Image (cartoon, rainbow, N blue to C red):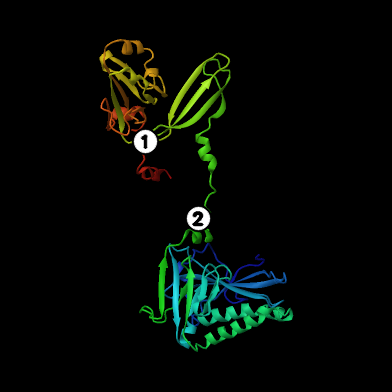
Amino acid sequence: AASGAVEPGPPGAAVAPSPGPTPPPAPDHLFRPISAEDEEQQPTEIESLCMNCYCNGMTRLLLTKIPFFREIIVSSFSCEHCGWNNTEIQSAGRIQDQGVRYTLSVRALEDMNREVVKTDSAATRIPELDFEIPAFSQKGALTTVEGLITRAISGLEQDQPARRANKDATAERIDEFIVKLKELKQVASPFTLIIDDPSGNSFVENPHAPQKDDALVITHYNRTRQQEEMLGLQEEAPAEKPEEEDLRNEVLQFNTNCPECNAPAQTNMKLVQIPHFKEVIIMATNCENCGHRTNEVKSGGALEPLGTRITLHITDASDMTRDLLKSETCSVEIPELEFELGMAVLGGKFTTLEGLLKDIRELIIEGNMKAHFIMDDPAGNSYLQNVYAPEDDPEMKVERYKRTFDQNEELGLNDMKTEGYEAGLAPQR
């Protein structure tokens, strides 16, 4: 919680009044390469609340750039009242597209001075000691290899007095382990340091850059789903929804008004999967006041890329029992009777061939005449049952065709722009 003004530069430095708004500095001036010889690179100081004694302390922010790496923000807090202090670093950039793993073979004392950027999300391991610092167990730090080990030792020593006072059996084992860590600082024998950061924002210095470093192996990898969730990049897997399958087996009901008498009525709706076709929505309304009944079928999908023309040669009365889905955009034709039914006349229907032809049923069934039944749907959302499925029906032909300009006009597709529409909107913004 900041309670004072931001003071760039050393405390007490005078700031000349500005006659007008100052343009923001260039990014290169904000993040200068880290260097002890750069006198112009000074931290920004902010008076802020100490969370230990609740008096005011001082937070210092330094925007800097790590050579051969990227920009970081170094934050340091100190309280002159209670002596509490804290230092951490944050990446000034985004989470990288891939995680990174640095494997350093420490062979000499010079390796202990390598600069290290360790973010909150990085895990640190020393396989020779079976030692690991898990991710998000420490704040990010700008330090060295020696500094990482020293920080680990300090963390282990922190509660040792209390363990010894309680005669905790682990205190002696921790003391032995601390001795091993201190021996690593002397590099009495080579050891391996691994820093694994799924965010891709940690760094281990290569003192030979831009030449290759034989002691350092850098591996970039794709994050796992668990690592994505840990970084907050992907929501947790949604809970299973067993009820979704149940909805397909249930009839949903909602209140509406009768289209004839306007009295309150109830509409039933159900999802139906038509074999060898697609999913459709069937809605049926029954009015108890006037007895009016309606049923309507809506396609469960979008307009198909191509129109569909289904031609069935009716040769037997059994053809009348074929299931049939006629969408609102489908027209029906029987050339032998010079009969044609335009689109949207009967609305969408899921019925049988006999049900659709009830007005001319007797002419087709009782007569000796064979006829062709043609369903033409430019939207491609109609269906006629193939009784031989999955084999081809010798009496039925299904054609896919490219819609004409007039058909696209009737469907409202000619004025629908799905590509490059943002360019047309740009001058209006």
Q: Is residue 108 left or right of residue 43?
A: left
Compared with residue 181, is residue 117 higher up or lower down, i.e. above or below? above
Asked if marks 2 and 1 touch (Cβ < 8 Å), the reply is: no
How far across and down, in percent of the image, does residue 107 sit?
A: 45, 85
How far across and down, in percent of the image, does residue 423 sit?
A: 36, 45
Name which residue lies at 35% across and 42% down.
419
Please state the total of marks drawn on the protein image: 2
From this viewpoint, is residue 30 visible?
A: no
Residue 234 — which label?
A: 2
Residue 262 — which label?
A: none
Helix, strand or loop at mark 1: loop
Name which residue lies at 37% across and 26% down.
329
Helix, strand or loop at mark 2: loop
Amino acid marked by disc 2: Gln
The residue carrying pointer 2 sits among few (fewer than 14), some (14 to 19) or many (20 or more) residues within 10 Å by Cα, namely few
How far across and down, in percent of the image, does residue 318 sit?
A: 34, 20
Compared with residue 9, is residue 257 higher up or lower down, i.e. above or below? above
Q: CA distance from mark 2 to mark 1?
A: 34 Å
Q: Earlier in the sequence, mark 2 or mark 1?
A: 2
Front residue (pair 84, 43): 84
Name which residue lies at 44% across and 69% down.
100
Amino acid marked by disc 1: Met
The residue carrying pointer 1 sits among few (fewer than 14), some (14 to 19) or many (20 or more) residues within 10 Å by Cα, namely few
Name which residue lies at 52% across and 40% down.
244
Front residue (pair 120, 349): 349
The image quarter in which residue 274 lies? top left
Location of the C terminus (image quadrant) = top left
Location of the N terminus (image quadrant) = bottom right
How far across and down, in percent of the image, does residue 263 sit?
A: 58, 18
Q: Nearer the viewer, mark 2 or mark 1?
A: 2
Instruction: Looking at this view, name the residue that lies furthest to the right.
Output: 165
Q: Which residue is mark 1?
A: 416
